[in-house]
Amino acid sequence: MYRALRLCSQGGGFEAIPDPPRTLDLWRIRASLEAAGIPILDARVMLIASLPPEVTISRSGRLLFKTSDEEDARRAFERLVALAGLADAPATTPPSPTL
């Protein structure tokens, strides 16, 4: 479902966007994460999970990892996929453009 983990346009974190687009069941994801002991803030249209790093999970499927460290984002992505049942395909980081 997630094909790429990429740096956000603002550069303050990494994001993963589902491909093809899909709507997430935030209630089910919240229940799964809370059962694993992950603190969750439920803002109805999105969840904020303290993995670390903090991750925003939107109903549209966008995942925002609030870290500038790519490896931290990747580890959090893999943990979130496993805990929340988001597995299809692991996110990969697209190659950096060469100058």
Image (cartoon, grey):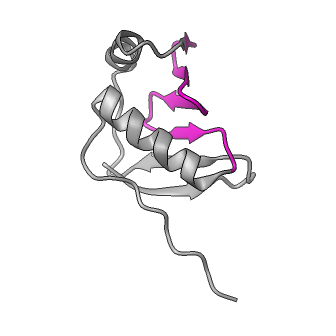
Residue at figure coordinates x 24%, y 47% from the top left: 88
Residue placed furthest toward the left: 88
36 sits left or right of 45 in the view: left
Q: Looking at the picture, how far across and down is residue 89, in whole percent?
A: 27, 52
* Depth check, front residue: 42 or 21: 42
Q: How many marks?
A: 0
Write down the quadrant of residue 29 in the picture: top left
Q: Is residue 95 visible?
A: yes
Residue at the image point whose x is 49% and y is 39% from the top: 76
Residue visible at 47% across and 16% down?
38
- Say whether residue 57 is left or right of residue 18: right
Q: Residue furthest bottom?
A: 99
Question: Is residue 72 positioned above or below 36 on the image?
Answer: below
Q: Position of residue 46 (x, y in %)?
A: 53, 22
State the image quarter where residue 92 is shown.
bottom left
Residue 93 belongs to magenta span: no
Residue found 59% across the figure and 75% down from its top = 96
Residue 24 place in picture, x, y as percent: 36, 28
Closer to the camera, 85 or 69? 69
Inspect the magenta stretch and tell me whether residue 67 lies in it. Answer: yes
Indicate whether 27 appears above or below 1.
above
Task: Evaluate whether residue 15 shows in this view.
Answer: no
What are the residue bounds of the magenta stretch?
41-68
Q: Quadrant of the C terminus?
A: bottom right
What x and y, as percent, mark residue 11? 73, 54
